[in-house]
Each structure stands twice: as C-alpha cells, then as structure tokens.
Amino acid sequence: LELAIIENIQREDLNPVDRARAFQRLIDEFNFTHAEIGKKVGKSREYVSNSVRLLALPEEILSAISQGKISEGHARPLMMLGDRPEEQNTLFKEIMYKKLTVRETEAIGRRIAYDKIRKKGATLDPETQEMEEKLTETLGTRVSIEKRENGGKILIDFFSQEDLNGILELIKSNKVKSGTEMLDKHIDANPVPPKNENIPEYIADSSAVEMTVENLDDRTPVEKKQDENSEEEIYSIKNFSI
C-alpha cells in the first residue's frame, strides 16, 4: 500500500489536492515525517509541508483547485486568511469570477494584511473605520481610508473597466456637483498648500484579457520553485510585506 501511494504521488497528472491527501495518508497510516516522505518522492521537506498545508483550506476551495479552476499558487494568500473566513471566501470568489492572477491575488492579500495590522494598531479612529465600512458596502468593493496629517486618500479596488464604470455611476448618483468640488473647498480653506505634498497618481487599466487557469499563475518558474521549497511557512501573514 505504501508503494502504491508513493507511485500515485509521482504521477505527473496528479492535482495538488490529491497529492496533499496522499502525503497526509503516509503521515497518518505509516507515521512518516515530512522529511522521510520528501526523500521517498524526490522532493524537499518544505515541499511536502507546504503541500499538506493546503488541506486546511475549506472544501469548496480545495474542490476548485482539484478541478483546475484556480491554481495552487492562489492558495498562498487564501491560506493567509484562514482566521478570517469571510475575507477568505470573498477573495476566493474574486479569483473565480474576476480571473485574478496569482500576483493580483497576492496584492489583495497584502492589502488585507495591511488593513488587519492597521486596525489592530488602532491607527484609525472609530468614525473613520465606520466611514470605511459604509463606503465598502455602498460601492460593493474593498475601500480603505489612509489618513495623514494633511488630508489623506481613499483606495478603491476594481478589477475591470466595467467595475470602474459602475463605481463612477454610484458616485454620480449621489449628485456630486463637480469633479473638483472637494479640492476647491480645500483650496479655499487652505490657500497655501503644505510643503513637499505628494500628488497621487491615479492609473486605470481598462484592458480586458481573456485568461486561462494556466496563465493566471503568473509567477516565474524560479518563483514557483522558491515557493514550493520555502523554508518558512509560505502561507503566514508575516511573509506578506506591507
């Protein structure tokens, strides 16, 4: 039985979830360590450990990985949200329906990680947090507010030109008088601008690209290899720079 499981693991067409479950069987039924399994299948201990961690994901996500609807690379930011099931499920749906690449998914993961640490540190006052939540509900996408000594900025997630148009329509429905109304009021109240004030750039990418599951994993072969054999737990929030 042990040999049969190992031979099954070495099949090229084995999906990541079945591979992880096969590793887990060797652990449960034969008391193998991750290092011992790695030697038997010609992989590193870290590769085995990172594979087994996939099994902590909800069944719906595991099913999507098994069926090739999302790639194994998407698991990293999803695993990071294991203690936030609602955010995890939302990100999973965005990957599925908006065809996010691995890098795009990781970028959202970093945003969520930043938001988690920011709120834990109570850098936002309750009133601003409430505004952030209301904007998120109103626009139907993630919104974060970054306050500074002089003003701040609002970050709104969107994933297509259609999303951007929808956000614009929602904002216009609130009958904003002009596109520079807030700026005009700020200039009237503060005739002399603060020194060294940065001017934010707003870039909207309206290109629509038809993508397959394979090219949604936009990591290079070297990056994939590094993730597979990472010494650290690659799904930990600490591995997402802010």
Image: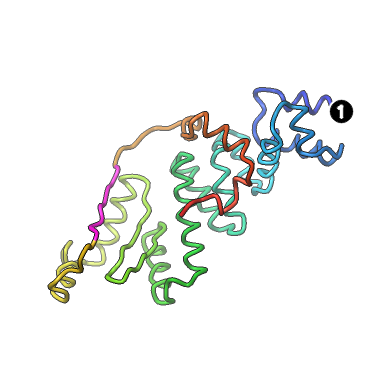
Residue 29 relative to residue 107: left or right? right
Q: Which residue is mark 1?
A: 1
Q: Main secondary structure of the magenta part?
A: loop
Task: Please give the count of numbered marks on the rendered protein.
Answer: 1
Residue 206 location, quadrant: top left
Residue 67, x across and y down, in percent: 60, 34
Residue 95 relative to residue 42: left or right? left
Residue at position x 23%, y 58% in the image: 199
Residue at position x 39%, y 62% in the image: 144
Residue 211 relative to residue 7: left or right? left
Q: Quadrant of the N terminus?
A: top right
Stretch of the chain drawn in magenta: 198-205
Q: Seen from this angle, which residue lies furthest front?
A: 195
Residue at position x 60%, y 38% in the image: 65
Residue at position x 42%, y 58% in the image: 142
The kind of residue on which mark 1 rests is Leu
Say how the picture is coloured: rainbow
Q: Magenta stretch: residue 97 in it?
A: no
Residue situated in front as seen by the camera: 93 or 48: 48
Residue situated in front as seen by the camera: 242 or 174: 242
Q: Is residue 11 above or below residue 124?
A: above
Q: Magenta stretch: residue 204 in it?
A: yes
Residue 166, x across and y down, in percent: 31, 53
Residue 216, x across and y down, in percent: 47, 35
Residue 9, x across and y down, in percent: 73, 28
